[in-house]
Amino acid sequence: MLYKNKNACSKTRVLILPAGKEGAHRCVSHSGLNIPGQKVHDTFEALLKELSFTQSAVDHLISRVTGLAKSTLHISEQRKKVLNAQLKAIDAKIEAVENKLFDGTIIDHTYKRWMIKYEGEKAKLREDFDLSQRLESDLHGELQLMPYLMNMPKIFQDSSLAQKHAILHQVFKQGLGYKEGSFRTPSINVEFEHKLLILKEKGLLFLEQPFGFSEGIPSCGDGGSPLQHLDGIFAVLREIYPKKSNQK
């Protein structure tokens, strides 16, 4: 696994060997720099443990999502009724055009022109209808996956290397560095901000403005779906635990 190493330079990365490997982590850009491997792994394991959500945090997240789901799914059901009526209307138009061609009322060229128009409209309506149908399933799947957030070390244990990198990118979008026995990052996913104080107190993670960066750290607004900052993590969790996310 690769992390930026700020003991060397801003572009240097440290090669993190799999857990259990002896020796030191080597800087891939500076051959003379080595970091004790066990120290990095122990610090990273402690970081993952503290990033894990508490039961109360998961309960609060579920409450936010179910509150959204009630209103969103009601709107979705109303939308599906409208789309279904529009689909039936398009099918009626297609049938009418087919009858006109059969009766000889219109020529083949006119028939094809109208069919292209109606089939295009029908495809768009079908896409919108299918999206509405998937909404409830997606919300249900994310609710099933939320308890996994209480054990981040287990998630990493069950993840492939690519999935580990994907999760780290979702939590630390501006990168994760290691310096003087602690991890450093310019910013953290807003859903994990409530962890910053304890992480700092334990010396596991510090927010550190990157060198030469003076425009501040970008942040997301308060609007939108309550899951917008966790969508990427849930996408990875669905890969790791596909059966769980598909349970009804």
Image: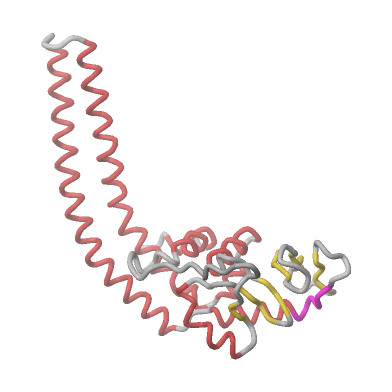
Please provide percent x and percent y for residue 207.
58, 78
Quadrant containing the N terminus in the rendered view: bottom right
Please tell me in which quadrant of the rendered image residue 199 appears. Answer: bottom right
Please tell me in which quadrant of the rendered image residue 42 appears. Answer: bottom right
Residue 191 shown in magenta? no
Give the magenta part as a residue range. 34-39
Question: Vertically, is 54 above or below 171?
Answer: below
The residue at the point 20 percent across, 58 percent down is 75
Q: Nearer the viewer, residue 95 or 36?
A: 36
Please provide percent x and percent y for residue 11.
72, 62
Quadrant containing the C terminus in the rendered view: bottom left
Please provide percent x and percent y for residue 54.
47, 83
- Image check: 76 left or right of 197? left
The residue at the point 27 percent across, 24 percent down is 116
- Image check: 145 left or right of 35? left
Please provide percent x and percent y for residue 72.
25, 62
The residue at the point 36 percent across, 80 percent down is 60
Question: Vertically, is 216 above or below 59?
Answer: above
Please tell me in which quadrant of the rendered image residue 160 appears. Answer: bottom right
The residue at the point 45 percent across, 64 percent down is 244
- Image check: 137 left or right of 213? left
